[in-house]
Amino acid sequence: MITIAECKLQCNLDETEIEFDRWFAQTIPAVVESSQAFLDRKIYVDQAALDADESAPETAVLFNASIKMAMLMLIGHWFVNRESSSALNLNDVPMGFEHLLTPYRYMVGVA
């Protein structure tokens, strides 16, 4: 869904900088899991992948530009802020992760 090259672009790194590749490789699956948990939906890379999964939930969603940008924004945030706390007073950026993903959240009882 997300490549290391896309992560580097998001984090303003040159493609040739490889010292963070292992970090990106371990972060990408965590971002996908976090996004799926927030959405309460399984994300499929495309329609073919969804069709190929006989056990796909009815609530599945296809990977799209908004989901991708939300994932990249979260990767960028984690890249800059490696720890769970900081001495800085950080605020959510408007139009961030939640703003991009909320329209795709599965809501019980909402059509």
Image (spheres, rainbow, N blue to C red):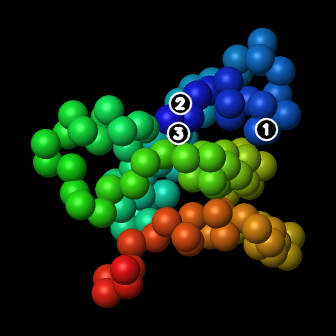
Q: Quadrant of the C terminus?
A: bottom left
Q: Residue at x 53, y 30 (%)?
A: 25
Q: Which residue is mark 2?
A: 25
- The location of residue 90, given as percent across then percent down, is 82, 72
Q: Residue at x 30, y 63 (%)?
A: 59
User: Where 27 sits versus 74, above or below?
Assistant: above
State yes or no: discs 3 and 2 in contact (Cβ < 8 Å).
yes
Horizontal relation, residue 49 to residue 46: left or right: left
Amino acid type at circle 2 is Ala
Horizontal relation, residue 95 to residue 105: left or right: right
Q: Which residue is mark 3?
A: 28
- Dot 3, crowdedness within 10 Å: few (<14), some or many (≥20)? many
Amino acid type at circle 3 is Ile
How far apart are the alpha carbons under marks 1 and 3? 13 Å
Q: Choose the circle earlier in sequence order: 1 or 3.
A: 1
Res. 11 mark: 1
- The location of residue 76, given as percent across then percent down, is 73, 47
Q: Residue at x 52, y 39 (%)?
A: 28
Badge 1 element? loop
Res. 109 mark: none
Amino acid type at circle 1 is Cys
Badge 2 element? helix
User: Where 62 sits versus 46, above or below?
Assistant: below
- Dot 1, crowdedness within 10 Å: few (<14), some or many (≥20)? some
